[in-house]
């Protein structure tokens, strides 16, 4: 809160309330002019707010879909209702909900990438980078490789530079999926760690490709 | 800017950009669904943004004027185009333009009061409170009295507790207007300063009412 002292008296200008006002707008649906169908739920929103915040929504809502979206709900495929709700919450308030677990963060990262909402993408990528462990690293690496999340990929590589983390990753549930879906990223990983840990790396390569 | 250090590398999450995005929305008029006629100019805006930010706009735009405002421009009386533009700028961006002179601040204060935009009202009232001088104090006091701006009125009273400031105010251009439009506030001022400066005050009273 900004505090100004005038004539010895403390006075206050309240902090910015734009995000609160838009959060209320999303909740109370005043003047909403769009509906979405997502995972069996119907959600309302405002064309101008979505267009202002996402270049992808702007192209869709003010371009080819302008007429059709006014008349009938827009169907969002391949996304759960809770993820789309969290995406809308960010679009209106510029903040994520207080409890953002890593599973929601990974879904929101994909959603933010899909709708080109850069700040949300950064927030979710930071969240995952800060919560890398040997159980999740294979899943994160596959996600990073499939969507081109370079910061997350780099953080996974740094985590896996430790031979014990690498071995633990290879025993994790996500490893088989990573191996089958993104074999090239494993080769890249080996190339990265090879010079420093030559002998260990050789054993690992053998284990990976056996 | 938030800076996070992960694995020894500095990474960044950009600061909130909601106000930039809405500022661009106001400028580029995407999906605008309202027009205003103000001082001979036509300005575009978005019903949902105005309703979210001002309870007065909400009542007008989502209530009785909902139908008529969709079809034809809304005429704004008793306000200059530049003041209404600055009001819209604040509604969308939650900030005033970098150079806010006291004349614009006084007009914007009245506009913010009219549309019940509390934070803009606080910002403009602080601006005036910080720029009270003997040339302007009579004008500010009349404004404060006519619109019920209690912080500005109190700041004027504190400024006028100095006999030299009081005398200078009585020689200023705004004094005659204050005396004719708000005689009661002068009586209130006299009552406030009387105990401390009894003899001076008596002289002043004589001068005021001669």
Image (cartoon, coloured by chain):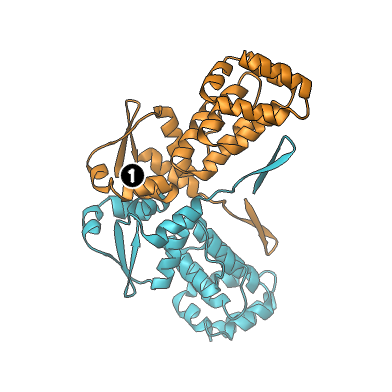
Chain colours: A orange, B cyan
Q: Is residue A130 visible?
A: no
x then y, percent, for residue B140: 53, 72
Identify which residue is drawn at 58% across, 18% down: A175
Task: Indicate whether B68 appears above or below B85.
Answer: above
Task: Indicate whether A208 appears above or below B169.
Answer: above
Disc 1 sits on a residue from what chain?
Answer: A
x then y, percent, for residue B172: 57, 84
x then y, percent, for residue B182: 47, 74
Identify which residue is drawn at 49% across, 79% down: B179
Task: Indicate whether A50 appears above or below A108.
Answer: below
Residue at label 1? A30
Q: What element carries label 1?
A: loop
x then y, percent, for residue A141: 59, 27
Task: Indicate whether B33 appears above or below A193.
Answer: below
| Left or right, residue A138 beside residue A82 | right
Identify which residue is drawn at 55% across, 48% down: B16
């Amino acid at each position: 809160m900004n505090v100004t002292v005038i004539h010895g008296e403390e006075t206050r200008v309240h902090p910015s309330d734009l995000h609160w006002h838009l959060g209320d707008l999303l909740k109370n649906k005043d003047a909403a002019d769009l509906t979405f169908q997502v995972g069996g739920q119907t959600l309302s929103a405002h064309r101008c707010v979505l267009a202002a915040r996402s270049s992808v929504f702007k192209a869709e809502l003010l371009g080819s879909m302008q007429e059709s979206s006014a008349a009938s709900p827009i169907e969002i495929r391949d996304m759960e209702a809770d993820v789309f709700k969290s995406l809308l919450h960010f679009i209106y308030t510029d903040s994520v909900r207080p409890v953002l677990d890593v599973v929601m963060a990974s879904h929101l990262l994909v959603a933010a990438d899909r709708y080109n909402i850069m700040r949300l993408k950064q927030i979710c990528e930071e969240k995952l980078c800060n919560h890398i462990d040997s159980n999740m690293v294979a899943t994160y690496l596959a996600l990073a490789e499939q969507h081109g999340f370079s910061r997350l990929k780099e953080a996974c590589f740094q985590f896996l530079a430790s031979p014990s983390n690498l071995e633990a990753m290879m025993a994790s549930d996500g490893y088989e999926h990573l191996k089958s879906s993104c074999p090239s990223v494993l080769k890249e990983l080996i190339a990265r760690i090879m010079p420093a840990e030559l002998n260990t790396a050789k054993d690992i390569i053998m284990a990976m490709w056996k």
